[in-house]
Amino acid sequence: MTGIQNHTCIHCGKADSQVPLIVFNYQGGEFRICTEHLPVLIHNPGDLTGKLPDAENLAPADSD
Ligand SMILES: [Zn+2]
C-alpha cells in the first residue's frame, strides 16, 4: 500500500474510466482533476478548499 492513490478527480470524484483526468503535482503530492473541472483549478481554486491543501491560498489566474 502506498497511501491514497485513487485515480479520481479531486473535485467530482469521477474515475479515469469515466472522464479524462489531468495529473498534476502539488506540494510534493500527485493529484488528478478531470478536464471538466480543470477551469475550477485555474479560475476558482478556492472552490477546491478541503479537497486540495491550502487551496484557499492559491491565486486565481485572471485573463487580463
Ligand atoms: Zn471533475
Image (cartoon, rainbow, N blue to C red):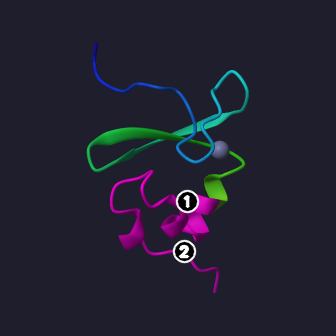
Q: Residue at x 38, y 37 (%)?
A: 30
The quadrant of the picture occupied by the N terminus is: top left
- In the image, which disc is placed on residue 61? 2
The quadrant of the picture occupied by the C terminus is: bottom right
* Label 1 element class: helix
* Label 2 element class: loop
Above or below, 53 against 34 in this view is below
Q: Compare residues 48 and 36 and report the one nearer the observer.
A: 48
Q: Compare residues 33 and 61 and report the one nearer the observer.
A: 33
Residue 4: where, in percent of width, then height? 36, 27
Q: Residues within 10 Å of mark 2 (few under 14, many from 20)?
A: few
Q: Residue at x 44, y 61 (%)?
A: 49
- In the image, which disc is placed on residue 41? 1
Q: Residue at x 64, y 80 (%)?
A: 63
Range of the magenta residues?
40-64
Compared across the picture, whether 1 is left or right of 37 comes to left
Q: Earlier in the sequence, mark 1 or mark 2?
A: 1
| Gap between marks 1 and 2 measured at Cα | 9 Å
Confirm whether the magenta stretch covers residue 61: yes
Q: Compare residues 49 and 64 and report the one nearer the observer.
A: 49
